[in-house]
Amino acid sequence: MRKFFFAFFAILLIAGAQAQYRNSETVFDRLVWNDEMLNIKLDTRNDFRTDFNNGNFDNASFQAHTLKLWVSGEIVPGVRYRLRHRLNKPQNPLGRDRLSSATDQAWIQFDAGERWTFTVGKQSVQFGTFEYDYNPADVYVPTMCFDDLDAYKMGINIARHFGNQTLNFQVINSDAPQFASPEYASRALAGLLLWEGKLFDNLIGTRWGYGIFQHSGDKCLNWITVGTQLNLGKFTTELDYYFGDRYMNYSSVVDGNRNFDAFVLDQSVSLNFKYDFGKWKPFIKGVWNQRYDKSPLDGGISHFVAYETSGVQAVVEYYPFLENKYMQDLRFHAMLAYNTTDFKGAFAHLESQNSVTALVGMRWLFKAK
């Protein structure tokens, strides 16, 4: 991590020393002075959050939800790059990716004419849904699937553009424990297809995806992710659906009664209603999740719904400086959310859990260079 910061600040110091060469045609000087070639942004979100669980006051604390460094630009027309690094996440190295787990994105992108785009490096896994496409700083209480899916991996994406539609085909490393067995993790890959579309003059938006993940030499896991958006002037609604198999240890949810990686079928639904009043942007979002356990328990019980959760959240965002290009992404927000968990099957004897979360905070994505 120290090397990362040293390199970053060294670039800034050298840039100051090179001021007399502002008109230079070297790539380095053009990076320093040309905003299209080098953009540096800092993304931060801080909240004060309180939690009540089954009527008990469990938490009241200030939290740094997001602290990210963005470096991006376009070297020449049709050749772009992006580095997005989290500063408030452990810098654990990933063996196959050979990048820190705190590095969300580190890719180079090439256009081949107007129809094809190639992205190489660490990138977002091409799951569908609109919830998944949001910056995590803009998601307050996510669905179960959004919260758990492995979101960034090394690989290659090939995009084909036609009209207002883009079809993505992606191949990535797939060594996350929820998908790959430990014995196969060093060679497991995944293939994903994603249709990003705009239909009827942007009345309908689509993010429909399918992914297949290698678990072992003779077993694959499948995911369907479907997001549909309706745009009516300043009103937007989004319906998202996730459905797929994976391996999860969910003992913390069922009080330690399932302390191993179970083979589960998960599904999540979210419905989001948003309205744009200009500086004020409220929305209401409902979520439903279900975990279906396909691993047998002692006593012969197998293939049962373990639990279902549902909830609703109301959010108000306020952007006081929309007219200022330096401050337009500064926002204040407040959220109130209610969530309930009902246990079923082998865990039907457990008491339902109810939680209420309230938070207020500030988020700012600002340009440092």
Image: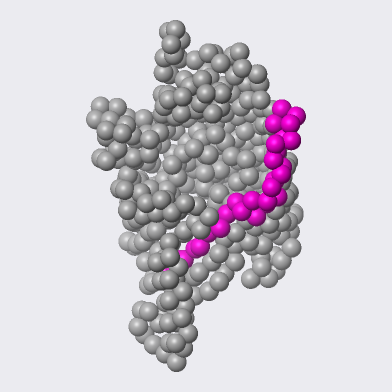
Q: Residue at x 71, y 56 (%)?
A: 332
- Magenta-highlighted residues: 46-74
**Residue 293 showing in the rendered view:** yes
- The spot of residue 205 in percent (x, y) is 54, 45
- Looking at the rendering, in which quadrant would you find the N terminus? bottom left
Say which residue appears at 43% left-offset and 42% top-offset. 150
For the image, the number of numbered tags is 0
The prevailing secondary structure element of the residues shown in magenta is strand
Q: Residue at x 46, y 74 (%)?
A: 9
Q: Position of residue 154 (x, y in %)?
A: 35, 50
- Whether residue 52 appears in magenta in the rendering, the answer is yes
Q: Is-magenta flag for residue 313?
A: no
**Position of residue 93 in the picture relative to residue 230 (left or right):** left
Residue farthest along the top direction in this orientation = 299
Above/below status of 111 relative to 284: below
Tell me the quarter of the picture where residue 211 sits.
Answer: top left
Q: Is residue 112 above or below residue 350?
A: below
Residue 235 at least partly seen: no
Residue 349 in the image: state x and y as whole percent: 61, 13
Tell whether 153 sits left or right of 331. left
Is 343 or 239 nearer to us in this picture?
Answer: 343
